[in-house]
Amino acid sequence: MRLLHLSDIHFKEPDCLEPLTDPERPYRTRLRTDLVSLCAEKGVDAILVSGDIAFKGHSAEYAAADAWLKDLAAASGCRPDRIYVVPGNHDVDRSACRASAAISNAQAAIANAHQQHRETVLRTQLKDPDSGPALFKSLAAYNAFASPLGCFVSPAQPYWFYNLDDLGGGVTLRLHGLTSTLISGLDGRDDQPGRLYLSPLQTVLDPEPDVLNLVMSHHPPRWFLDEHAVDDAVNDRAPLQFFGHEHRQRCVSTDSYMRFSAGAVNPERHEHDWKPGYNVIDIEVVGTGKDRVVRVRAHVRQLQKSPERFIALTTKQGQDVWAQDILFPSHATHVIRPAEAQSAPAAAAVPAAPGAPVHVATPAEATMSSPSTKGLVFRFWNLPDSQKREIMFKLNLITQEDLALTDEELYDRGLRLAAKLGLLEQLAREVDALQQQG
């Protein structure tokens, strides 16, 4: 599987709305050209964008970013429904934060809580009918952009995860998109490390058998009040880690994990050590049983000036490709006890098949995290609003009272209800029928 990792693409209005005079456009063009050359023999399977899609969190910025990302996907051979995004601090509309006492009060309650009680305070704020929506109000434009990509975040689920394709050896790649901006936007919390909060709610990262966890967050662990807890959880449970924010192109490689920090696609041109960058990572699992290994081969790319082009950021050994084999341990999924072996029929004594998880997710949760569902969400969102509502009402997934919600909340609720009720296949047929009509 080949992943393209981008971060801090910073589409900034009014510049991004005028292509002929946008000073950042040449660097995006250079990136596109370099990526197409790099992926000439093997295309990209998924695009991961670790935050700061916009610059001010405005709708026009997301429209420009959406068009560019879809063009980049087409050029690199990636399906548009395989784009995954998380919010960064520039995706927070700070004007919404300044205008709302509810946002300020909810964020302050979390930030000022004693460290032993902060998780409880966060849970309380998320569940509160006023404070919960307030925490996500400044991400309204981001959510409108992210919802068709299946990356909507809300008080009910401030993160997302998806199971991707089999990597070989019966191993599934699971992407976890974390929201690092829950208390971002006020009081200079983005200006220095150690002032934001992620929480254990987002770092469960269940280490299930035959699942390879990949974490994507805009802010690296050192930016959180719970830095050490986040760092330990991520390092112990997620062999693949993708971060942004710091505008530094880095790859940290160990026997148990690889951490990628993407240099900004569009950093501020006047900042120190300005170097746009991106990453392309190839992942596969080789071997069987206890000898399975996660083989990672990464191209860490950075812009060079005079002549202007992207080049490889090399390893200490001067190699263009960053290579690391991470041991993927085998897991017993069922233990046959002596008494059980004697009394049970022979067929029942067979261990669980490879890939069978110990923890079984709810049917709705498992269905919503599948690649096919993400593709359905993408196709559904590309229908006209009238047709989306027609389907939702036809399948009794929304009510007239629900229309008071934003479109993002409305359709996320309806889609999740469809998964819970086992109606996604019927919903897919309705979408297909409408698309065929016109």
Image (spheres, helix red, strand yellow):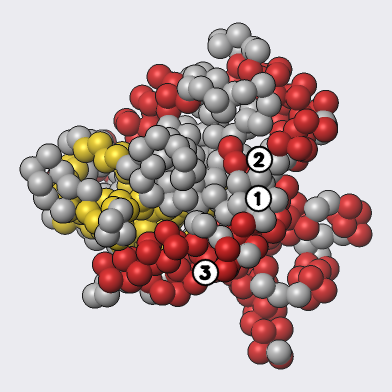
Is residue 406 rendered to the left or right of residue 93? right
Query: Within the image, what quadrant is residue 96 found in?
Result: top right
User: Taking the image as drawn, is residue 291 in sight?
Assistant: no
- Quarter occupied by residue 428: bottom right
* SS state under label 3: helix
Is residue 75 rendered to the left or right of residue 128? left
Q: In this view, does 173 lie above or below 240?
A: below
| Number of marks in picture | 3
Residue 248 % position (x, y): 36, 39
Q: Position of residue 191 (x, y in %)?
A: 55, 25
| Residue 274 visible at all | yes
Whether pointer 2 and pointer 1 mark residues with C-beta atoms closer than 8 Å, the reply is: yes
For disc 2, the neighbor class at 10 Å (few under 14, some 14 to 19, many from 20) is many
Residue shown at 64%/12% (left/top)?
A: 113
* Pick the front one: 264 or 334: 264
Q: Quadrant of the C terminus?
A: bottom right
* First-in-chain label (3 vs 1): 3
Residue 29 on image: x %, y %: 42, 66
Q: In the image, which disc is placed on residue 403?
A: none
Q: Name the residue under label 1.
A: 142
- Residue that badge 2 annotates: 92
Q: Which mark is residue 70?
A: 3
The residue lying at 54 percent from left, 50 percent from top is 10
* Label 1 environment density (alpha carbons within 10 Å; few <14, some 14–19, many ≥20): many
Specify which label sits upstream in the sequence, 2 or 1.
2
Q: Identify residue type, mark 1.
A: Tyr
Whether 416 is drawn above or below 395: the answer is above
> In the picture shown, does residue 214 fall above or below 127?
below
**In this view, 161 is above or below 392:** above
